[in-house]
Image (cartoon, rainbow, N blue to C red):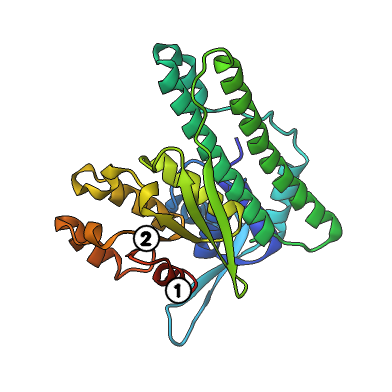
C-alpha cells in the first residue's frame, strides 16, 4: 500500500508546503487518498524530518500565527525516486455497492430499481464533480508538457472509471427489467433561462412530484450538467409531503441543495405560504441565500439572478 509519506514527498518535490496546505491538496485531489485522519499528515512530517527526508522552517507573519513550511531534501528526493521505479501494484476493486447488490434478490423489482437509481445518481454526481475538478485543474503542477499530459491522463482515468460504472449500472437495469415493465425514472420537463448572461434552470413539470432526497440529487446533477447553481421550482412539482413539516422532507431537500451549493426558489401560492408552521419555515428560509419561497415568478427570478 502507498504510504502517506510517499504522497507527501511527491507534493513537496513540487513545492514546499505547510501541513495545512498539504491537507487541502489531499482533500481536493481525486486520486491522492489514504485511510486515516489529518493528524497523520503531521505525524508523517515529523517522522520524515527525523529521517532527514524533509526540513522545516518557521515563517513569522505580522497579523496571523507563524507557519511551519516543509521542504524536501536530497535524501527525500532519493526515497521518492526509489518508490517511483518500484513495481506498481494492481488496482484494488473495493465497491461496497457490489456486496449490497449481491443479496438484492430479496427485494421486489420496484425496490431493486430504486436502489439502482440511487447508485446511478451518486455516480452521476461524482462524474460531474470530477469533470469540474478537471476543468478547474486545482493543484496540478504543470511544470512541463509531459507532466501536464501525465496529470491529464490521471483525470481521464478517473472520469472513464465513473463513465464505465454508469454504463454498467444502466446495462444491469436493462437486463434485469427488460421484460418486467418496471417504471423508468420519470423525465423532467425543464427550460434553461438565460438573462443578461446569467442562467438558471426552470423545472416546469415532472410526471411525479419531487418526494425524496434522491429527487433533489437529480436536480443538483441537472444544474451541474448545465453549469449553473440556480434553480426555479413550481408548487405543482413538489409532493404534498414537502409542505408537511412533520415529514422533514422540506428540511432534507433544502439541506441537499445547501450542501451542493444550489440556489433554489419555489413559486408557491400565498395561501400555502400562510399555513401554520409552514409560514414560520418560509419566513426563516427567506432570510437565507440558498432556498426561498416566492408568490411570483418575477420575484423568484430577480432573487436567483442576483
* Mark 2, residue position: 267
Q: Residue 162: give x, y in percent of width and height.
A: 63, 37
Q: Which of 48 and 121 is in front in this view?
A: 121
| CA distance separating discs 1 and 2 | 12 Å
Asked whether, in this view, residue 30 is left or right of residue 105, the answer is right
Q: Quadrant of the N terminus?
A: top right
Q: Nearer the viewer, residue 35 or 286?
A: 286
* Residue located 85% across and 59% down the image: 145
Q: Residue 39: give x, y in percent of width and height.
A: 43, 53
> Which quarter of the figure has residue 115?
top left
Sooner in the amino-acid sequence: mark 1 or mark 2:
2
Is 80 placed above or below 62 here?
A: above
Is 306 placed above or below 218 here?
A: below
Is 86 placed above or below 43 here?
A: above
Visible in this render: residue 50? no
Q: Residue 53: give x, y in percent of width and height.
A: 63, 56
* Residue located 78% across and 50% down the image: 150
Q: Residues within 10 Å of mark 1 (few under 14, many from 20)?
A: few
Q: Nearer the viewer, residue 144 or 107?
A: 107
Q: Residues within 10 Å of mark 2 (few under 14, many from 20)?
A: many
Extreme residue toward the right, this view: 145
> Which disc is residue 70 wearing?
none
Q: Identify the element where label 2 is drawn.
A: strand
> Which quarter of the figure has residue 164?
top right
Q: Residue 61: give x, y in percent of width and height.
A: 48, 83
* Residue located 56% across and 15% down the image: 176
Visible in this render: residue 56? yes
- Proximity of marks 1 and 2: CB atoms separated by less than 8 Å: no
* Mark 1, residue position: 302
* Residue located 29% across and 50% down the image: 250
Is 188 placed above or below 15 here?
A: above
Amino acid at each position: 500500500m502507498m504510504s502517506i509519506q510517499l504522497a507527501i514527498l511527491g507534493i513537496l518535490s513540487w513545492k514546499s508546503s505547510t501541513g495545512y496546505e498539504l491537507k487541502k491538496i489531499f482533500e481536493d485531489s481525486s486520486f491522492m487518498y489514504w485511510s486515516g485522519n489529518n493528524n497523520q499528515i503531521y505525524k508523517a512530517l515529523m517522522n520524515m524530518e527525523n529521517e532527514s527526508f524533509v526540513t522545516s522552517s518557521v515563517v513569522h507573519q505580522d497579523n496571523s500565527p507563524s507557519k511551519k513550511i516543509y521542504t524536501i531534501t536530497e535524501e527525500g528526493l532519493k526515497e521518492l525516486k526509489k518508490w517511483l521505479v518500484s513495481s506498481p501494484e494492481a488496482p484494488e476493486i473495493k465497491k461496497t455497492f457490489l456486496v449490497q447488490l449481491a443479496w438484492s434478490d430479496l427485494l421486489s423489482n420496484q425496490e431493486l430499481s430504486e436502489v439502482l437509481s440511487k447508485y446511478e445518481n451518486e455516480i452521476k454526481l461524482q462524474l460531474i464533480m470530477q469533470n469540474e475538478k478537471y476543468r478547474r485543474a486545482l493543484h496540478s503542477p504543470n511544470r512541463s508538457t509531459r507532466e501536464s499530459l501525465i496529470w491529464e491522463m490521471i483525470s481521464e482515468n478517473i472520469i472513464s472509471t465513473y463513465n464505465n460504472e454508469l454504463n454498467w449500472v444502466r446495462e444491469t437495469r436493462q437486463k434485469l427489467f427488460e421484460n418486467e415493465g418496471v417504471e423508468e425514472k420519470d423525465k423532467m420537463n425543464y427550460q434553461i433561462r438565460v438573462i443578461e448572461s446569467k442562467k438558471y434552470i426552470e423545472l416546469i413539470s415532472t410526471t411525479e412530484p419531487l418526494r425524496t432526497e434522491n429527487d433533489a440529487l437529480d436536480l443538483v446533477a441537472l444544474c451541474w450538467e448545465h453549469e449553473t447553481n440556480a434553480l426555479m421550482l413550481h408548487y405543482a412539482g413538489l409532493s404534498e409531503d414537502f409542505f408537511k413539516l412533520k415529514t422533514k422532507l422540506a428540511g432534507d431537500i433544502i439541506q441537499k441543495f445547501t450542501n451542493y451549493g444550489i440556489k433554489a426558489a419555489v413559486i408557491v401560492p400565498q395561501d400555502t405560504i400562510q399555513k401554520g408552521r409552514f409560514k414560520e419555515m418560509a419566513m426563516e428560509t427567506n432570510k437565507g441565500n440558498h432556498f426561498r419561497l416566492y408568490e411570483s415568478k418575477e420575484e423568484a427570478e430577480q432573487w436567483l439572478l442576483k
